[in-house]
Image (spheres, coloured by chain):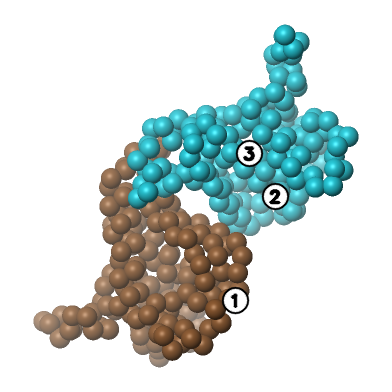
Chain colours: A cyan, B brown
Amino acid sequence: MAEATIEAGSDEAFLATPFVQQMIKMLRAQDMHGTWDNKTDLDLLDPFILNAEKRREIPIIGDPDPEVLWRLELFYNAIAVCIERETGNIVTPMMKMSHEGFGRMVLIAGRLIVVNKQLRDVHRFGFASLAKLSEQGNKFVNEAVEMVRKYPDVVNYGG
Amino acid sequence: MAEATIEAGSDEAFLATPFVQQMIKMLRAQDMHGTWDNKTDLDLLDPFILNAEKRREIPIIGDPDPEVLWRLELFYNAIAVCIERETGNIVTPMMKMSHEGFGRMVLIAGRLIVVNKQLRDVHRFGFASLAKLSEQGNKFVNEAVEMVRKYPDVVNYGG
């Protein structure tokens, strides 16, 4: 079996999780002109990974640029799609940026906020490793799915 | 009694409702330099009232200007404060404008969306009369308060 060759805890194992697969799919979908065709999945995710060294190079205070906002939105959009697939409920994101990288991101199913995240230091958005990215994304998905199942009346309120 | 002189259904009666009083209070609070000191409460609310004649003067399609967005946000902020006062729960607004006056406004208490409003034609935001403004505001407040009381677990989720 092919799966037997993927070592648990390896990059390959994290790349194979449904959440990370969804991110890769969305990244590739945005590549209209095939300029990323020769990039590996790991290459595509590289801008999301901020190890200690890369993080030190970024100023502590700063305004988020369009690319980091794009990555942030893609991360939460991937979470939204995974929740939709798991529950069958439509999930929509809303983001509010206030000042210097502070803000709030919510994912909404009906009248329920299934993911609620205060944003800070958005200009340094990223994860220490692919493992952390995968863990964080899957954690949001799992908690949201649990919440949708716990409060179906709120999700379907007025519907 | 002073109240006896206010005729039901009159402008004075609508001005006296807690929701409209809250709007007036917030409008006056934003008048830093006292330039509105000589304006009546009705004068202050006038930009929120779009009768058929005033509405006809506004193009059907258009981008909302900062002043109309300011009025829209003030209207929903007043609703949020009234819900807070009634329930004791913090209520925060989030708005997303997409294109040409389309968007969404939500008021959030904990993990519950207590007001959910699809926005359209924001550049023509306004009410046919003071009565309509009062009715609409109070309706949102009452429905939200009912929802908070129905789903306290969702409001206090994770708290």
Which amino acid lies under the numbered mark 1 shown in the image of this protein? Gly
Q: Name the residue: 45% across, 30% down.
A: A146
Q: Residues within 10 Å of mark 3 (few under 14, many from 20)?
A: many
Kind of element beneath mark 1 = loop
Q: Name the residue: 54% across, 78% down.
A: B60
- In the image, residue B49 sits, relative to residue B88, either above or below, namely below
Can you say which quadrant of the picture contains the N terminus of chain A? top right
Q: Are marks 3 and 2 in contact (CB under 8 Å)?
A: no
Q: Is residue B27 visible?
A: yes
Q: Nearer the viewer, residue B110 or A24?
A: A24
Q: Distance between the residues labelled 3 and 2?
A: 14 Å
Are both tags, 1 and 3, on one chain? Answer: no
- In the image, residue B120 sits, relative to residue A153, either above or below, namely below
Q: Name the residue under label 1.
A: B62
Q: Mark 3 points at which residue?
A: A78
Q: Given this view, does label 1 or label 2 mark the residue nearer the observer?
A: 1
Query: In which quadrant of the rendered view does residue B16 lie?
Result: bottom left
Q: How far apart are marks 1 and 3 (CA)?
A: 33 Å
Q: Is residue B28 visible?
A: no
Q: Name the residue under label 2.
A: A69
Say whether disc 3 or disc 2 marks the residue closer to the N-terminus. Answer: 2
Q: Are marks 1 and 2 in contact (CB under 8 Å)?
A: no
Q: Residues within 10 Å of mark 1 (few under 14, many from 20)?
A: some
Which amino acid lies under the numbered mark 2 shown in the image of this protein? Leu
Chain identity of mark 3: A
Q: In this view, does B139 lie to the left or right of B73?
A: left
Which amino acid lies under the numbered mark 3 shown in the image of this protein? Ala
- In the image, residue A42 sits, relative to residue A155, either above or below, namely above
Q: Name the residue: 72% across, 25% down.
A: A15
